[in-house]
């Protein structure tokens, strides 16, 4: 198995990204257990960890006596693949442990972790920060009241759009469609991502497969993505699609003129006291940060982003992300149409269901936790960050990526329920 920082390992992102969206109970099966509206944000903390986190005894923040005395060793036994585990209550770290696995050793507070599809949620936060600062606005020339409704044909490079016939609905895919994973582009994440060069735009690009008149420059991957066949009309059907997150990144750069990683480092990470090198958020295709994955980040820094969500986008005395954006991005889409696939893995007629996904955020906890209401970022091989706003609680776990096809989510969630949530006094 390639190491976590190797180029080959980076290209394995897809197998795990697929699991991040599909390795849980079906959305409709737990929808009735999840609240339709977000829980109220927690009250302001005693301090802000802009400089560094402070630690406290679990008992001083509502956990039962001795609740976490053996949490690290219990986690190592139950979840031998875990690499970091943080429990944060009321803004204080009440548990922090790091664990080595055969393939990922030397894990400490300073280790950068591949967090895979958790990246998608960071992408959404970056857009929220840009919109709050006024950098993600609809250009006057587009005459679009809401930038989220700007279409691909107005933002993407002309050389890319020119590869689509006049009147083609793919030209009309909006930023909102991409954020909500409703582009309508034909995509079977579990079957095609990094497995089928004829279907996967990244593999098609890497293998030099013919894709019409796509430009041979930094827009090549974007062109390959938007040239996929259309399975559903844009905006009508939800389908977990990592490449929709790539479209989000392309929209962002087309509107702001900056890559996601560069913008996030200065405008989102820095105010939180996070020192971030944009090189730790991979660019694929030449011009665009990979909005769907490949972010490398310390667990403590990721937890700061979770804390920003816990407190409705406010940090110290500044509303870094507007409450309107927070509410919009985490609101579950609700009743709608879900993509379906036939026996051969090809897109089929959509089916009705409840969509517990907002704009690059999940609103479910998954099996083993009874579908508790949470704001959740999820990724390959068990990467999870849950923000329980009604409890003032953040639980963050990172794992190695050795078992990209095996189910870990139920075990992780059961552990969190039995060893963390159940130890919090009512």
Image (cartoon, rainbow, N blue to C red):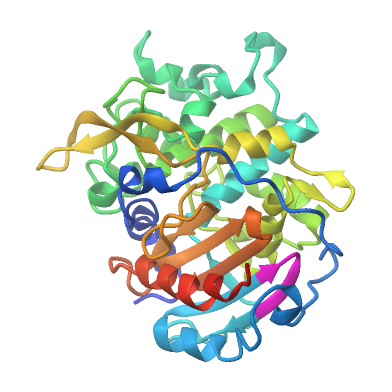
Q: Which residue is situated farthest in the right direction here?
A: 317
From the top left corner, tell me how far across and down residue 143 is, in percent: 65, 8
Quadrant including the N terminus: bottom left
Judge whether 38 appears above or below 395 on screen: above
- Residue 127 or 198: which is nearer the viewer? 127
- Residue at left offset 65%, top offset 63%: 393
Magenta span: predominant SS is: strand
51 sits left or right of 32 in the view: right
Please state if 307 lies on the left or on the right of 410 as rendered: right
In the image, residue 234 lies in the stretch drawn in magenta:
no
Q: In x, y percent, where is residue 375?
A: 56, 51
Q: Is residue 351 visible?
A: yes
Question: At x 51% / y 78%, what residue is drawn?
Answer: 419
Percent of width and height locating residue 56: 77, 79
Residue 251 drawn above or below residue 162? below
Q: Is residue 5 visible?
A: no
Q: Which residues are magenta?
A: 88-95
**Magenta-drawn stretch contains 94:** yes
Q: Residue furthest front?
A: 426
Toward which corner of the image does residue 110 lie, by quadrant? bottom right
Residue positioned 65% across, 44% down in the render: 125
Quarter of the figure with residue 226: top left
Question: Would you place residue 36 above or below residue 23 in this image?
Answer: above
């Amino acid at each position: 198995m390639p190491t976590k920082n190797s180029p080959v390992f980076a290209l394995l992102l897809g197998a795990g990204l697929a699991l991040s969206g599909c390795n849980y109970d079906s959305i409709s099966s737990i929808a009735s257990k999840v609240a339709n509206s977000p829980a109220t944000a927690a009250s302001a903390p005693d301090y802000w960890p802009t400089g560094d986190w402070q630690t406290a005894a679990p008992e001083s923040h509502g956990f039962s006596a001795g609740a976490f005395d053996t949490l690290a060793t219990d986690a190592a036994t139950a979840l031998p693949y875990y690499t970091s585990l943080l429990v944060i209550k009321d803004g204080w770290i009440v548990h922090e442990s790091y664990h080595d696995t055969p393939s990922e050793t030397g894990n400490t507070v300073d280790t950068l972790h591949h967090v895979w599809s958790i990246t998608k949620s960071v992408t959404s936060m970056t857009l929220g920060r840009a919109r709050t600062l006024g950098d993600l606005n609809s250009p006057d020339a587009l005459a679009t009241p809401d930038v989220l409704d700007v279409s691909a044909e107005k933002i993407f490079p002309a050389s890319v759009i020119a590869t689509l016939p006049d009147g083609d609905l793919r030209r009309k895919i909006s930023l909102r469609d991409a954020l909500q994973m409703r582009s309508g582009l034909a995509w079977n994440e579990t079957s095609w991502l990094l497995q089928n060069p004829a279907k996967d735009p990244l593999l098609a690009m890497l293998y030099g497969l013919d894709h019409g008149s796509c430009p041979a420059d930094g827009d090549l991957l974007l062109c390959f993505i938007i040239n996929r066949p259309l399975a559903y009309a844009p905006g009508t059907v939800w389908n977990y699609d990592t490449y929709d997150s790539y479209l989000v990144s392309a929209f962002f750069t087309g509107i702001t003129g900056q890559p996601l990683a560069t913008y996030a480092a200065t405008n989102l990470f820095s105010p939180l006291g996070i020192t971030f090198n944009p090189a730790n958020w991979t660019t694929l295709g030449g011009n665009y940060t990979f909005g769907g994955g490949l972010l490398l980040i310390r667990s403590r820094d990721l937890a700061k982003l979770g804390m920003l969500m816990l407190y409705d986008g406010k940090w110290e005395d500044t509303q870094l992300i507007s409450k309107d954006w927070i509410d919009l991005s985490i609101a579950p889409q609700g009743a709608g149409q879900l993509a379906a696939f036939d026996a051969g893995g090809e897109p089929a007629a959509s089916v009705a269901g409840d969509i517990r996904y907002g704009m690059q955020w999940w609103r479910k906890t998954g099996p083993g936790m009874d579908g508790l209401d949470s704001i959740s970022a999820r990724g390959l091989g068990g990467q999870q960050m849950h923000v329980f706003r009604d409890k003032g609680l953040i639980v963050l776990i990172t794992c190695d990526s050795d078992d990209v096809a095996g189910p870990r989510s139920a075990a992780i969630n059961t552990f969190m329920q039995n060893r963390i949530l159940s130890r919090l006094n009512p």
